[in-house]
Image (spheres, grey):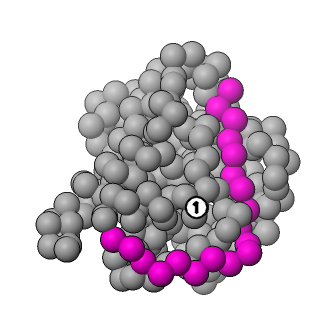
């Protein structure tokens, strides 16, 4: 596998570097949904065209990591590969544009729409590390109605490796656990693990995110996630990334 990128997704795929010799993993795109200037999006589009041309010339399969959240826009529906796309944010609109470019490129592809990945070397502005840091700081602002599907990055990489072994044709697949946790409950879990109590400010906003993984299971029938999977992901993340800090907490 050829891997383009240096971030969390690219790093998680390094153990599979010698698998799937016909595959190019594009893991160097915009990785945060926070508002950015057009330069960041334009840079990804340029890199995307270059990578697709490389794949055309070398007859490689192209793997792109898209958004399982903002690309759909706000919707109460369970999200799957056929759910209409109606992104409201510049990031979501950008991801939709990238998907369209890939689908029209003539290159064999696998577009992976990801849930909330968590793991080592994660951008501190992303959901779980940001909430952990807020809890540590003693004050958390949380959206009452928000739900998120957490997926450990090591599990993601292992599943993708297996998925690449069985997908032959171009396709789009949601890669998630299929379990959503309410963000207020997520914050409670963080506090329990850290054994701290933060002041919680609850605002009446936020959107649910629930994903169907039926298509993923059509390729990998044995995929399963325990009912406590979201909580184990939180525990694993805190232990892995904040173990040294925890030793100094009261």
Q: At which x and y percent is residue 170?
A: 66, 30
Q: Tell me the quadrant of the picture where the C terminus can be found.
A: bottom left
Segment colored magenta: 196-214
Q: Nearer the viewer, residue 135 or 250?
A: 250
Tell me if residue 161 comes above or below residue 194 in the rendering. Answer: above
Q: At which x and y percent is residue 72?
A: 76, 55
Tell me if residue 233 comes above or below residue 33 in the rendering. Answer: above
Task: Count the labels in the image.
Answer: 1
Which residue was labeled with disc 1?
A: 183
Residue 3 visible in image: no
Picture residue at 61% right of the left edge, 37% below the top: 178
Q: Nearer the viewer, residue 47 or 90?
A: 90
Q: At which x and y percent is residue 32?
A: 53, 68
Picture residue at 24% right of the left edge, 64% below the top: 242
Q: Main structural element of the magenta stretch: helix, strand or loop?
A: loop
Q: Tell me the quadrant of the picture where the N terminus can be found.
A: top left
Place residue 42 in its image quadrant. bottom right
Q: Secondary structure at mark 1?
A: helix
Picture residue at 51% right of the left edge, 58% below the top: 186
Place residue 174 in its image quadrant. top right
Q: At which x and y percent is residue 81?
A: 74, 38
Label 1 Cα neighbours within 10 Å, binned few <14 / some 14-19 / many ≥20: many
Check if residue 132 falls in the magenta segment: no
Picture residue at 64% right of the left edge, 51% below the top: 68
Residue 130 visible in image: yes
Place residue 245 in its image quadrant. bottom left
Q: Nearer the viewer, residue 230 or 150?
A: 230
Check if residue 198 falls in the magenta segment: yes
Tell me if residue 147 comes above or below residue 222 in the rendering. Answer: below
């Amino acid at each position: 596998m050829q891997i383009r990128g240096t971030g969390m997704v690219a790093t998680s795929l390094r153990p599979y570097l010698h698998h799937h010799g016909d595959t190019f993993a594009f893991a160097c795109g915009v990785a945060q949904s926070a508002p950015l200037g057009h330069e960041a999006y334009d840079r990804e589009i340029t890199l995307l065209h270059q990578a697709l041309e490389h794949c055309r010339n070398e007859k490689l399969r192209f793997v792109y990591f898209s958004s399982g959240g903002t690309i759909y826009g706000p919707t109460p529906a369970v999200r799957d590969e056929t759910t209409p796309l109606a992104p409201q944010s510049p990031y979501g609109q950008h991801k939709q544009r990238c998907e369209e470019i890939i689908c029209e490129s003539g290159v064999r592809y696998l577009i992976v729409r990801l849930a909330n990945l968590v793991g080592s070397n994660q951008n501190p502005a992303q959901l779980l590390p940001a909430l952990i840091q807020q809890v540590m700081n003693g004050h958390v602002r949380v959206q009452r109605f928000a739900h998120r599907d957490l997926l450990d990055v090591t599990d993601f990489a292992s599943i993708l490796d297996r998925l690449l072994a069985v997908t032959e044709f171009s396709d789009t697949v949601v890669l998630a656990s299929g379990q959503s946790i309410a963000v207020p409950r997520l914050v409670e879990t963080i506090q329990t693990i850290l054994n701290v109590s933060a002041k919680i400010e609850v605002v009446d906003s936020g959107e649910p995110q629930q994903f169907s993984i039926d298509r993923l299971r059509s390729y990998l029938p044995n995929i399963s996630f325990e009912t406590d999977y979201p909580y184990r992901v939180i525990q694993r993340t805190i232990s892995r990334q904040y173990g040294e800090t925890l030793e100094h907490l009261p």
